[in-house]
Every structure is written in C-alpha cells, then in structure tokens.
C-alpha cells in the first residue's frame, strides 16, 4: 500500500505500553530514496523532545490510522539523543542501531541491509568486522561532507526540471508502507498544466541540486503531459502504475526488485 508523507504527519505512534506522540516529519536516504526514520514529537509525555523511530520498530498494519511499535516507553525515553534540527550523521545512526539491536541498513545487499523489508526477521549488528567496515565508511563520509539523510518537509516545494524546461514542484511523496521506499514524487504542474498532478519516480531523477532546491529528471515535458494524471483523493492502483511505466517505457520496480529469503535472520527485536 502507498500512502503520502503528508497524510502520515500527525499519525499517532504507539508503544507497547501507551502512546508516545505523533509523527512530525520523515528522514529519507537520498541515495535509495527510502524512509529511514520517523521524527516523533513526544508532546506532554517528554515535553520539548523529539525522537527518531525506525521502520524496524513497526508492526505492519496496512492503512492503520496509528502506527504500533514493538518498543516500550522506557526504551524510547532512554534512546540516544539525536538533534533533529541538525543533520543526522552516520556515527549517530550507529549508536541508534546498536541501542535497539537493529542491523545497519547501509551494510548488505538489500534495501534494509541483510533484509528486503524491515518487518522481516533481522540480524543485529556484529561487533567486530562489520564495525570496522562501518567506521571506515564513517571516515570516508566525513571527509566527503556529503550527508545522505534529508527531511521530507525540506524537499517539498523543490522545483522539477525536465530535459526541456520547468516541470512543476514537489508537492508530496508516495511511500510504500512495506519497504518504506519513496516510490513517487507527487508533482504539481500548476505553472505549466494548471490543476494537473503527475507522478515521477525517484529512479527517473538524474540529480538533485540541494543548493538550488531543484530536482533534475530525465523526462521531457511532452512525456509528462501525456502521462496518466494522478488524483490524490483516490488510492493509487497498480493499473495506474502499469499505464505510467508502459507510457514512459521504463522497467517496473515491482518486477525486478530483489527479495530477501523469508527465513533470513535470527529473530525479531
């Protein structure tokens, strides 16, 4: 099932022993366009504090109005502090993963490291060889000064540039609630095709200029003009996706994404 990032804002997050707060924003990985954390405002429970919750914590309930976790309030309260108004660096992610016993999503062959979906059984981080590899990666990323986690709200409003001109702006994202992949940017074309919204997959993005707040895609305006129109008030059907990918002559993601073996891992946290 695909749900918009906008509709996720304000959704209640539930611990095993009570509600902890509501979703305020999402952090996504700009290399794979996958949501890695939900930013949760803890309200009156922990006044003035926001916490990060990983999709590894969620018990999948398609279409639910609230999201249930496998965590206790005490676990969340004692979790590593992360300043959500500053970039989340890899060292902080390592601390976070070790605390909860989550695998490093950036180490392994699948979208979530050693598993394809965060709901599958997981392998906790290994302390020795993997950690050495991670520390080397942290050093490389620090030297390159290229953070790869972005807040969804910061990207909404970015302009999209087609191969032959301005296409519109990013209004929202459609997120797969199984893999937590951002499947599409919802693009408002009001300055070009008034009242029309279209879908653009992150796979069709050539590059993102964070300095210009602009997204460059390898599509022409005429291709988008002839693409199926998207109605945000109607759940996206696979038939719509089929027509879109066929029209653009692109490979369908649901036919080629790798799947991790169902039994891989040593049990859930």
Image (tube, grey):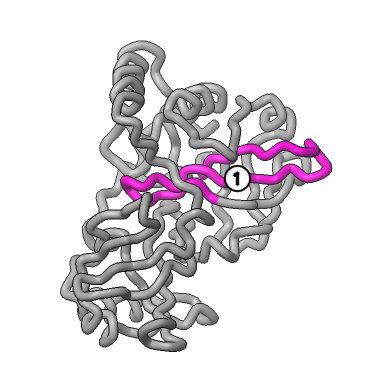
Q: Position of residue 204 (x, y in %)?
A: 25, 63
Left or right position of 81 against 229: right
From this view, report whether residue 122 is shown above or below residue 138: below
Task: Point out the residue furthest to the front here.
Answer: 212
Residue drawn at the location 71% of the way across and 29% of the way down: 77
Residue drawn at the location 54% of the way across and 81% of the way down: 233
Q: Position of residue 20 (x, y in %)?
A: 74, 43
Residue drawn at the location 46% of the way across and 87% of the way down: 195
Residue drawn at the location 78% of the way across and 36% of the way down: 46
User: Is residue 263 something that shows in the picture?
Assistant: no
Q: Position of residue 62 (x, y in %)?
A: 55, 61
Start-end of magenta stretch: 26-55
SS under mark 1: strand
> Which one is in front, 67 or 162?
162
User: Is disc 1 surrounded by few (<14), some (14 to 19) or many (20+) residues within 10 Å?
Assistant: many
Residue topped by disc 1? 39
Quadrant of res 193:
bottom left
Task: Point out the residue furthest to the top here.
Answer: 128
Please give the count of numbered marks on the rendered protein.
1
> Which one is in front, 51 or 144?
144
Please say whether residue 193 is one of the residues in the magenta stretch.
no
> Which one is in front, 206 or 118?
206
User: Is residue 199 something that shows in the picture?
Assistant: yes
Left or right position of 49 against 2: right
Q: Position of residue 206 (x, y in %)?
A: 23, 58
Please say whether residue 30 is one of the residues in the magenta stretch.
yes
């Amino acid at each position: 099932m695909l749900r918009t990032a906008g509709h996720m804002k304000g959704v209640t997050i539930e611990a095993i022993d009570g509600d902890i707060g509501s979703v305020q924003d999402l952090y996504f990985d700009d290399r794979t366009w996958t949501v890695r954390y939900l930013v949760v405002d803890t309200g009156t429970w922990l006044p003035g504090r926001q916490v990060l919750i990983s999709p590894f914590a969620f018990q999948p309930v398609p279409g639910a109005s609230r999201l249930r976790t496998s965590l206790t309030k005490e676990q969340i309260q004692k979790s590593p502090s992360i300043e959500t108004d500053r970039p989340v660096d890899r060292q902080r992610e390592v601390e976070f993963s070790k605390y909860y016993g989550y695998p490093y999503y950036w180490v392994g062959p699948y979208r979530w490291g050693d598993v394809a979906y965060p709901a599958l059984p997981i392998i906790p981080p290994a302390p020795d060889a993997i950690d050495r590899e991670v520390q080397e990666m942290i050093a490389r990323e620090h030297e390159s000064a290229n953070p790869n986690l972005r807040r969804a709200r910061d990207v909404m409003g970015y302009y999209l540039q087609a191969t032959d001109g301005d296409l519109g702006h990013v209004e929202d994202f459609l997120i797969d609630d199984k893999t937590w992949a951002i499947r599409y940017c919802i693009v408002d074309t009001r300055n070009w095709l008034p009242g029309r919204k279209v879908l653009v997959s992150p796979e069709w993005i050539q590059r993102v200029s964070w300095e210009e707040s602009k997204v460059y895609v390898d599509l022409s305006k005429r291709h988008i003009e002839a693409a199926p129109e998207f109605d945000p008030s109607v759940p996206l059907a696979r038939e719509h996706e089929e027509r879109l990918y066929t029209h653009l002559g692109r490979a369908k993601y649901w036919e080629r994404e790798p799947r991790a073996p169902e039994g891989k891992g040593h049990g859930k946290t």
